[in-house]
Image (cartoon, rainbow, N blue to C red):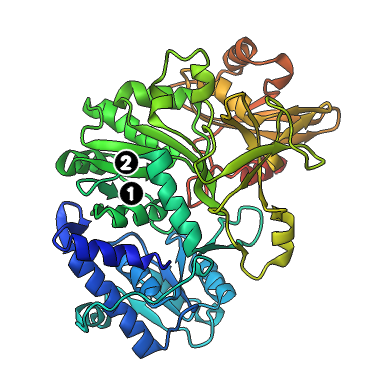
Amino acid sequence: MNVAQWLAASARLHPDAPALLRGTAVQADYATFARRAAAIGAGLRRDFGIRPGDRVALFMTNCTQYLECLYAVWWIGAVVIPINAKLHGREAAWICDNAGATLAFVDEDGRQALVAVTEDLPPSMPMLSVDSADYQTLQRDDGGTPAPSPREDDDLAWLFYTSGTTGRPKGVMLSHGNLVAASLCYLADVDAVSQQDAILYAAPISHGAGLYNFIHVRMAARHVVPPSRGFDADEVLTLARQLDHVSMFAAPTMVRRLVDAAKRRKERGEGIRTIVYGGGPMYLADIRDAMATMGQRFVQIYGQGESPMTITSLRREFHADSDHPRYLERLASVGPAQSVMQVRVTGADGRSLPTGETGEVEASGPAVMLGYWNNPNANAETLKDGWLRTGDVGRLDQDGFLTLSDRSKDVIISGGTNIYPREVEEALLAHPDVREVSAIGVPDPEWGEIVVACVVLEQGAAANDAALDAHCLDAIARFKRPKRYVYLEALPKNNYGKVLKTELRAMMRA
């Protein structure tokens, strides 16, 4: 099934329902949204020769036109390549070239970035700016709203390039069937959706936030792009009050900023229905603070580009069930497997480990990618007998709740013993002077590696190794405590907000 059929259905059933909004201003109802998508798709086919299976890149910041472009591409059976707008033009050009993009939708910033590296782009790849008169002409073309092109469940729909923190990014191939399975998991494992809801795109549509568009399109909900086109905590809180029934995806760093803003404004996030958080570790201290400030509005998901947003979920009832005897243990987990997925933990020999033992997390189910684009070696390494090797380390409890430790490459081996950085980080974040922390392993001639804690202090706090050391000794085993503390103004992060431990390790080596 072509995912564009969901937009066509909502346009038939709810033509007057508000669909695309910039802030509180409605830009299109569902009938207009579908008509524009069909018209732009027809223009792609007629003027640029785009055919089913061709790849079309999107390199622009969040805007309502982004959603029009997505559905225009799918309407004619082509494939989208969503590229993070924060990437350098040369990085975006490499993705276009690797994927064999036949056209790129851009905004003015994206156009300038790609024009500067024209020599790196696929030969003769046209660019179509959503800020141009040509795009507006395509939008207005009214040839009716024909049905979307037929697609099979295994046909490629979304070619997402990983963040590439350990080398060149890999193109994750997601099919129409993958996207439908992931979308239905939202209803079963994350939250209900109705026509009165509004999904707020404060995080990039090119990444996890954009994957939640599908089920909100199917339910004819509102799609809201903030006027800033990005994340501003005060703007989010103000918009939520105005729009009501707001849902959004947020990385843990965004949640922290929202909580800080809510405290400053003496608010509780009124108008926000659900904050789905994921994309990096949410520490126990942070989620408890978030709930104390904003109430039970939170759902956690765990996934990765290869099984997007779909491996496990920690639903709001688990956040709220403080009477459960293992409540804090569950709150520190990422929850049980989502409805279409299976999860297991394996040892070095690839066999499943018993409950409570730590090993590599593997996932299987219809949300798992088709494979990597033109990368058979990576496919062979990552996909084994129907299971996705996530590269994450964790353990399952007796009820199937998964608790993550770290990425396998981040485990610290000191004196022959595995130390999981997240345990150290959780301990230090419970100290009132610590705002952010990342624990890494640094080579040591005696121990092999030692634990170094890179710490960002709360405003006004002073560096105090002895106080942090004493705090750690009260919370974790002596051998796990940091041997060294390094104080930084900020932790290096990639364009998705993930801490770059590779850069921290390089900093320590230097």
In the picture, which quadrant includes the C terminus?
top right
Q: Is residue 113 left or right of residue 135?
A: right
Expressed as whole percent of the image width and height from the top left, the position of residue 318 reads 43, 25
Q: Is residue 156 above or below residue 220?
A: below
Residue lying farthest right? 446
Mark yes or no: residue 481 visible: yes
Q: Are circles 1 and 2 on residues that touch, CB within 8 Å? A: no
Residue 208 seen: no
Badge 1 amino acid: Ala
Name the residue located 26 percent from the left edge and 83 percent from the top edge. Answer: 134
Residue 504 falls in image quadrant: top right
* Number of marks: 2
The residue to which callout 1 is attached is 202
Residue that appears at 53% across and 79% down: 121
Name the secondary structure under disc 1. loop
Whether residue 17 sits left or right of residue 498 in the image: it is: left
127 relative position to 361: left or right: left
Few, some or many C-alpha atoms within 10 Å of disc 1 (few <14, some 14-19, many ≥20)? Answer: many
| Amino acid type at mark 2 | Ala
Residue linked to disc 2:
192
Query: On screen, 502 above or below 325?
Result: below
